[in-house]
Amino acid sequence: MREQWVTLTVAIVGVVGTLGAALLTQSRAERTKRLELEAAAQQQREDRQHADNARLAEQVLARQRELLDLRRACYISLNTASRQYLTAQINLLHAMRNGMEVDTSLEQMEARRLAHRDSYAEAQMIVPAPVLHAASAASRTLNRGYGILKQMLALPPEAHALQDFEENDVATSWAGLSDMRAAMRGDLGVDDIPQ
């Protein structure tokens, strides 16, 4: 009988071992599958995060390019309007000196002044502070020249007053425009581009 108990015990242990092995294998397979699913989900989250970061970086670059293009257009407009304003002042100066076509030159100067004012107003809303500082200085110089010319028109100027304006005020205005243009080019990085 003892042998039967031993045989029965061995049989029970064998069946329990077989069933236990199957359960253990099933449990490990489920655990492995769960880990694989978690790893796949983690990889998807990381891929999504990477895609989101790449999209955000692309949006930032696009916005920076858009702002650079906006500033470049503003700089071109302001530089052109400022130069034309000064050229109109010089043309009026020559007309006053020659006594010919003063009214036409005055009208052109007024139109150029208004165009400059509009370009400068746009720049005030777009450009960074260092460029705005240079643009402001140039604008004040141009407007001071405008005021002097208007005073000369009210009272007939002496020849030396016209000469002084040309030698001092025009030269100062050109220098201010040069400083403004240098600040603009610096902001755009034009001078930093390797040749």
Image: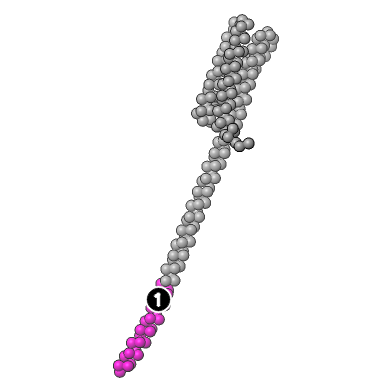
The amino acid type of the residue labelled 1 equals: Leu
**Would you say residue 61 sits in the magenta stretch?**
no
Q: Position of 4 compared to 191: left or right?
A: left
Where 146 falls versus 120 (above or below)?
above
Q: Position of 107 compared to 141: left or right?
A: right
Give the x, y percent position of residue 37. Answer: 46, 64
Q: Which residue is drawn at 59% across and 32% down?
A: 191
Where 148 falls versus 130 (above or below)?
above
Give the x, y percent position of residue 112. Answer: 62, 20
Residue farthest along the bottom direction in this orientation: 1
Q: Which residue is drawn at 46% across and 61% down?
A: 39
Where 42 falls versus 15 (above or below)?
above
Q: Give the residues in magenta.
A: 1-27
For the C terminus, which image quadrant?
top right
Task: Identify residue for label 1.
Answer: 23
Magenta stretch, main secondary structure class: helix
**In the structure shown, which secondary structural element does the residue marked by tag 1 occupy?**
helix
Where 134 falls versus 64 (above or below)?
above
User: Hey, which quadrant is residue 30 in on the image?
Assistant: bottom left
- Judging from the image, the colouring scheme is one colour
